[in-house]
Structure formats: C-alpha cells, structure tokens
Image (cartoon, grey):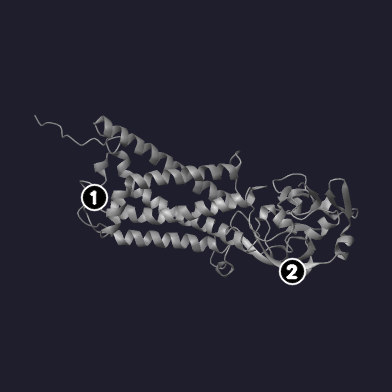
C-alpha cells in the first residue's frame, strides 16, 4: 500500500528564519536609521520651536526676528516629517524578522530582551503616531477628539526618548555596520541569503533616498515658492484672496455680518482706560508698511506686504506702558483662533501691525477685514483676523 504524501503545513506564525532576504541586514538598517534619526531630530527640534512660539506667555520670550524665522523652522518641521515616512517604512521592513526572534532562555538575557522589545514597541508606536497625525494636521484633517498640539508635543518627547534608548542599546551594532561596507555579511542573521536577489543593497538604499526626495519635492513648495509647480501634495499652492492663501473663510467662521457692519468699532482697553475707533479713525492714524510672511503650523507660508497701524501706537492712546502683554480678540464667536496673546516684545515691535491693507488694497473679508493682526516671526494661527478688541493684561 502506498503511504500518503507528507506535505509541509504552513505555520500560522512565521519565524525569524523564514525571512532570508539579503536586503534585511544591519548594514542596510543602520544606514536607514542614521538618516531617519536626522529627520526625527530635525522634526523634534523644530517642533519644540513651534510649541514655544504658540505658548501664550512663555518664561523666555519668543524672538521677533528674523521675521521669517518661523516660516523656515515650521517648513523644515513638515518637510523633515514627510521625508521620514519612506525611511521609516523601509527600516521597519528590514527589521521585521527580528520581531519574530525567539526570546532567550537565560533569565537575565530574557529581561534585557523584554526591555528592548518594550522600548522598540514604544518607539515604533510613537513614531507612527507622530507621522500620521502630523501629516493629517498638515492636511487639516482631524478624525480624532484629542487636542492635537499638546498631544503631538508630549508624544514627541516620548518618541525622541525611546529613540535615544534604542540608539544606546544598538550603538555597537550601528557603529560596526556604518564603518563596514554595505555589502558586508559580518552582522547578517544566520540563514540570510549569500548574495543579492532582485535588488542590491545599494539599489534599495538609493530607491529609498529617491522616495524621500520625491516626498520632499511633492510637499516643500508649500514653504518654498519656486517649488510650488512640482509640489503636487503641498497643502497650499500659494494662491488665495489677494494672492495669499487662507485656512478658513469669513463665512466658515460665521463672522461676515459682524465684520462688515457700519457700526464696527475697535475697542482698546488698559485698566479703566478705554478707547473705541471706527475703521475711518484707524485709517486716519499714522500707517506703517512692512513685508511679513504668513507662516502656518501646517507648513505652508507666503510672503506679503501689509499696511496698518502699529499696535504700539494704539496702546499709547490708552497709556499702556512699554512691554505690555495684550489679549487680542476676534469678532468671530468660535474657533481656536478667536483669541491670541501678544507678548510685550511683540506689542512693542514697530512692525507689529493692526493691518488694514494687503498688497496695497483693503483687506478682503477672508483675510480679516476690517483689520487683522500681523507680527514678525509669529505663527499664522496667532495672527488674529477680524480684530474687535485689544486689552492690556500686564
């Protein structure tokens, strides 16, 4: 009698030795990790700057110069995060087999193995969260209920801390891999193929660098004007009312009626001193013109020329002392941009304006008519539109 043929039964859970690709090597992973670390480092540092810039009353005043500073740092933040996406995906692919390795039997080694796995889990989860939510924020898509800014800030610290632990644990392997030729097999896992298959290691790395470059070019135009024609994924193309992009229209904010009524008055308050000014009053005051960029947290920015009344002049009309912190209130009744705090170094700056004109024409309703705040080196979310009240708080 013929015995039935015995076939291999596929395992439900693969093992580390099931993955033998020549590309899944520490020589490749270390090089990917090096550039991934740079992009994460840039995103972390510029993220701290953005958080500082948006803090209402920071213990260390955010600088007013250079006027284009936030435009550069926030542009770098979004560009670095975008470049990190292909780097992270390919790096996770190269190390995936290590996640399936059997844990050691020795208790001490098992504990160290477990701690390393926990740190990696935290790093991967935090990295994916930061990139996914960061890109969603850049696209102004918020399918969640939590407050983005403090959550993104907190997870940034967790991600960079886990990255530091990971680098410290893997430093001997990283140093050896980077010091060796990319085709070296000295650190390869047992069972790794002896040579390249459909792609060489250099080919994989070059493809990854190219993917990161394409991602950058596809988004950087939101910050770099001369790249706008190729930045098909840029969240803002550079066009908008009066040639400057906007995030939200006056109709969206429900402020059209309040902003266009003939009885509009700007209220300026300092303690028991209060003054009210019509649009005609504001236009009769000394005007200042300044070229200042609008730079938003989503990574887009645009340069523009603004004309209006220096905030310092308005504060002097109610005897506000130098260095006064000012609460700026919009006519809009809802939205996170309704109120902003103007620190003393900003309220004193000669180019911090209550702008009435943009590019030589009266502000369009969507840019904040009848007047809006514009200040140097300040996030766009704090450049309050449809201003109705300035109140000295300190």
The 10 Å Cα crowd at callout 1, few under 14, some 14 to 19, many 20 or more, is: some
Q: Secondary structure at mark 1?
A: loop
Under circle 2, the secondary element is loop
Question: Decide: marks 2, 1 in contact (CB < 8 A)?
Answer: no
Distance between the alpha carbons at the discs numbered 2 and 1:
61 Å
* Residue shown at 87% from the left, 45% from the top: 272
Residue 357 appears in the figure: no
Q: Indicate left or right for 177 with 248 as reference.
A: left
Q: Is residue 319 at all visible to an observer of this figure?
A: yes
Q: Residue 227 in the image: x percent, y percent?
A: 55, 68
Q: On the rendered structure, is 288 left or right of 34?
A: right
Quadrant for the N terminus in the image = top left
Q: Earlier in the sequence, mark 2 or mark 1?
A: 1
Q: Residue at x 45, y 62 (%)?
A: 213
Q: Circle 1 sits on which residue?
A: 188
Q: Is residue 194 left or right of residue 381?
A: left
Which label sits on residue 359? 2
């Amino acid at each position: 009698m013929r015995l039935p043929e015995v076939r291999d039964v596929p395992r439900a859970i693969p093992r580390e030795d099931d993955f033998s690709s020549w590309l899944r090597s520490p020589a490749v992973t270390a090089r990917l990790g090096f550039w991934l670390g740079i992009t994460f480092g840039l995103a972390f540092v510029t993220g701290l700057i953005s958080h500082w810039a948006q803090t209402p009353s920071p213990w260390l005043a955010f600088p007013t110069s250079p006027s284009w500073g936030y435009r550069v740092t926030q542009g770098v933040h979004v560009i670095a995060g975008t470049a990190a996406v292909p780097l992270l995906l390919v790096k996770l692919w190269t190390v995936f087999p290590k996640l399936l390795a059997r844990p050691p039997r020795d208790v001490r080694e098992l504990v160290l193995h477990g701690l390393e796995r926990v740190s990696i889990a935290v790093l991967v989860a935090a990295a994916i969260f930061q990139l996914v939510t960061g890109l969603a924020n850049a696209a102004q898509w918020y399918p969640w209920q939590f407050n983005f800014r403090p959550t993104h800030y907190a997870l940034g610290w967790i991600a960079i801390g886990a990255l530091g632990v990971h680098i410290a644990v893997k430093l001997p392997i990283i140093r050896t891999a980077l010091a060796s030729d990319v085709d070296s097999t000295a650190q390869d896992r047992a069972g790794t193929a002896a040579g390249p298959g459909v792609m060489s290691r250099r080919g994989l790395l070059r493809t990854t660098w190219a993917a990161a470059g394409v991602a950058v070019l596809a988004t950087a135009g939101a910050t770099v004007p001369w790249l706008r024609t190729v930045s098909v994924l840029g969240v803002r193309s550079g066009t908008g009312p009066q040639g400057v992009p906007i995030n939200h229209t006056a109709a969206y904010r429900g402020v059209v009626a309040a902003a266009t009524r003939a009885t509009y008055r700007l209220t300026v308050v300092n303690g028991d001193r209060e003054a009210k000014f019509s649009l005609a009053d504001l236009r009769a005051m000394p005007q200042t013109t300044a070229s200042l960029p609008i730079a938003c947290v989503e990574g887009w920015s645009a340069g523009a020329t603004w004309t209006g009344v220096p905030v310092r002049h308005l504060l002097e009309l109610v005897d506000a002392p130098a260095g006064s912190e000012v609460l700026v209130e919009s006519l809009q009744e809802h939205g996170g941009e309704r109120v902003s705090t103007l620190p003393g170094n900003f309220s004193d700056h000669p180019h911090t304006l209550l702008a009435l004109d943009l590019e030589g024409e009266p502000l369009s309703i969507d840019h904040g008519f009848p007047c809006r705040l514009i200040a140097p080196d300040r996030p766009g979310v704090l450049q309050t539109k449809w201003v109705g009240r300035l109140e000295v708080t300190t």
